[in-house]
Amino acid sequence: MEIWKWVFVGILCYAAFASTVGAVKLGRSQPTERISGSAGDVLEDDPVGRLKVFVYELPSKYNKKILQKDPRCLTHMFAAEIFMHRFLLSSPVRTLNPEEADWFYTPVYTTCDLTPNGLPLPFKSPRMMRSAIQLISSNWPYWNRTEGADHFFVVPHDFGACFHYLEEKAIERGILHLLQRATLVQTFGQRNHVCLKEGAITVPPYAPPQKMQAHLIPGKTPRSIFVYFRGLFYDVGNDPEGGYYARGARAAVWENFKDNPLFDISTEHPTTYYEDMQRAVFCLCPLGWAPWSPRLVEAVIFGCIPVIIADDIVLPFADAIPWEEIGVFVDEKDVPNLDTILTSIPPEVILRKQRLLANPSMKQAMLFPQPAQPGDAFHQVLNGLARKLPHDKSIYLKPGEKILNWTAGPVGDLKPW
Amino acid sequence: MKLSALRLSYMNRRSTSFRGSAPLDSSAESAVKSPAAIFWLLLHGVCCLISLVLGFRFSRLVFLFLFSTSASNLYGMPFRQLATTADLANPLNVPYNPVVNPEVPAINKTVSSRVIVGRHGIRIRPWPHPNPAEVMRAHQIIESVQKEQRIQFGVKSPKTVIAVTPTYVRTFQRLHLTGVMHSLMLVPYGVVWIVVEAGGVTDETAAIIAKSGVRTIHIGFKQRMPNSWEARHKLEVKMRLRALRVVREQKLDGIVMFADDSNMHSMDLFDEIQNVKWFGAVSIGILAHSGGADESSLVAVKEEVEKRSSMPVQGPACNASNKLAGWHTFNSLPYEGKSAILIDDRATVLPQQLEWAGFVMNSRLLWKETEDKPDWMKDLDSVDADIESPLSLLKDPSVTEPLGSCGRQVLLWWLRVEARSDSKFPPGWIIDPPLEITVPSKRTPWPDVPPEPPITEKPVINISEQTVKHTKTRSSRSKRRSKRKHEAKVVDTQVSVRHSEQN
């Protein structure tokens, strides 16, 4: 009897072993892999039912009229603020009863004052935002109830709510004082930086989904480019000597690797840009004037492993997406050794990264499709907001208590808009 | 990204950076008319004037000499700790690894960050060139990525490709067989190459196919290849059937395709034939060239061809519902009466109605006993050796699967190019013993060259490129020249001219 017991145990062990090996083998041959970040497996969560958002009805001079003046705002990389508004207006999380709302949204398009070249000027944005906040605090009681702690704003500009494109100026201004208790949804993210508030939600910049879908090539086209990059290395218009633009990192990439056949890098913008990214293994995403760039979105959509060269950057939805496992992070001081770093990554790690990138929910989370689809960036923002619920009781101010100083900030901001 | 909007700020930056290691204090820009400010302004103006005269910003040089820690560090260390850049009229920081102390903003920052705003140096390593070991590793990475792609997107369970090639030893054999061999070497699936040789197994052919690196089966066929195209086609059919018998005997498993040695195959062909279930057909491009026929017949043929506007394609034809409806064959009417009969002829070589190369079959069709072998396949032994195309192996030709999006993709090209049957070539294409000197080099006198014999032919030799009579050159140059065939008449004239000049 003893021996039969041992045989039975042995068979059980072997079965367990074989099944785990089989599972591992199955996992390796799957084309994708599940993504779970620090907040858990939350990419596919459905925010409907978990939170309620009230959208303030602002006069159209804050949103519609601005858009009418310049429809280019719908296609540039800051278009997220406009599409977020449109999505919330027709979303099931919207509530028309502010008493039951968990979050309040103020639709003000601060990034829509464009130069003839298409670059947004942030000079009027602080005044616009201030004026909007004055309006909502005087017409509705909900701002004063918490001084904005359960309100969120979309500020997709270069340095978020610091409202300037020059980093030194932005740091000097800091985040608009009135927004210091609100949650900010922004594209800018850098650790230990004045313009990234704690609790902010980082989103990807807007990239046109239809345009990218139109350039997909068959998946069996072999990836033959090792490293791919197209963009400026020296911004000769604004920084001809180099060293300021991208903190010298892009110039370092050019000087070190312009002769390297593994690196397909140039400033020319070809018509086959999207197709070439799909034929590359690594895509460089170095910082420019700001650390974030739409290249990250493009790399994720096209399955090219992003090589992120920006110190201390905070990537979109950092708590839902484990970027460390998906991309390659290179310190700016290590740029001269970029080729050594990239070639010493073991092939299994690279294949795993590609499997993670192939996950459709990963690609969906980076896009702002119209109309909204489940799992896209809009839903990830709502998921992020939902994860912050329930609000702590301490955000509700006692009557008469005031925290915000309405006259703080540079004198120019106090002028009415 | 920021263009005109930043020009204003750039002006500010220029003035502040001129102050070198002075902190970037924006509040100082507001007009404070202290003597120091006026002094700096004047100095700035003077320096601007001097720079204008010199042609470059010498301020950097000044700081270089004032603040450099040690001159020996100039070129040795990879990252220098100097305070300025030494760019002489060169706006780009090129190889001298310039480094500037980052100008720390004097703004009070509430958080400490290791990322400093301001001008940074451009780091360049001392030897910015690729490392061969790293390049090899990168290629291995690319290999593994592509292998994974093939597993995911390519054919799920690839079958071995069994290529059947009839061949025989002749001048153009090396050319044709090398082409087929290189195509087969590139096939990402397993390959078995069955080479059937007319006239028996020879070392020539064996030497060529030994370099392929794929598994080869070299079979000899006792008959010699005849000299007429008609007879050659018939013999090739027999050779292919012989190869199919080998497939049956050895029970080779895979997809049989007919790779004639002068055809050109695209790599997509091998991917496409993996989709065949039992018996398939692809479209062939027919490159029926007229080898050097004289002008008038060429023009006539071209006109006829254009009139009928026929495609030089042979293959399956589908109806609107993508089912096999018939066959598209090459229109050979324009060439009637003008086609080549013998291999030596310089007329157009025409293909058969349906070439064997356009058909592929699952090797299990040839096996003697298999469970799921369809019953429309005739047994090899019961087939007459005079069949025209593999369709005669089927009882019902309509079961053929059209491949390549229903025959719309042309995946291989048929070509027949041969030299004259009496043309000679060095065996194995190795020249041994060395050839005689045909054109002595002008510059280096070769001591082994015997003194030139006196020229005995007529002195009138035109430099123009007219064709010289073949007999004339042969009589005077028989000792110096190896026998040339049709070409090199022009060379003959020029050389003979040169000789007459030298004398």
Image (cartoon, grey):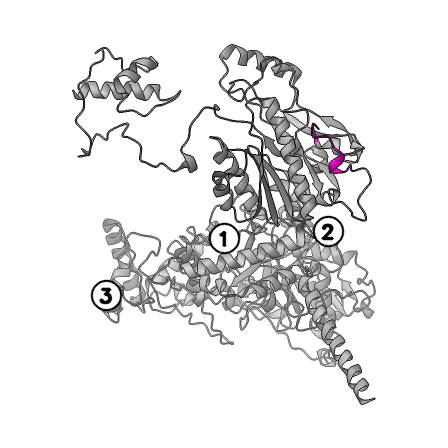
The number of numbered discs placed on residues in the rendered structure image is: 3
Residue B184 in view here? yes
Q: Is residue A89 above or below residue A401?
A: above
Q: What stretch is highlighted in magenta?
A: B379-389
Q: Of the residues shown, which amino acid type is indicated by label 2? A: Gln
- Could you tell me which residue is drawn at 20 percent across and 14 percent down? B456
Chain bearing mark 1: B
Q: Mark 3 points at which residue?
A: B65
Give a yes or no on whether discs 1 and 2 share a subunit: no
- Could you tell me which residue is drawn at 27 percent across and 20 percent down? B477
Chain bearing mark 2: A
Q: x, y percentage for residue B299?
A: 54, 12
Q: Name the residue under label 1.
A: B2
Which mark is drawn over residue A370?
2
Q: Nearer the viewer, residue B314 or B302?
A: B314
Q: In which image quadrant can residue B367 be found? A: top right
Q: Which of B248 and A392 is in front in this view?
A: B248
Which secondary structure lies at badge 2? Answer: loop
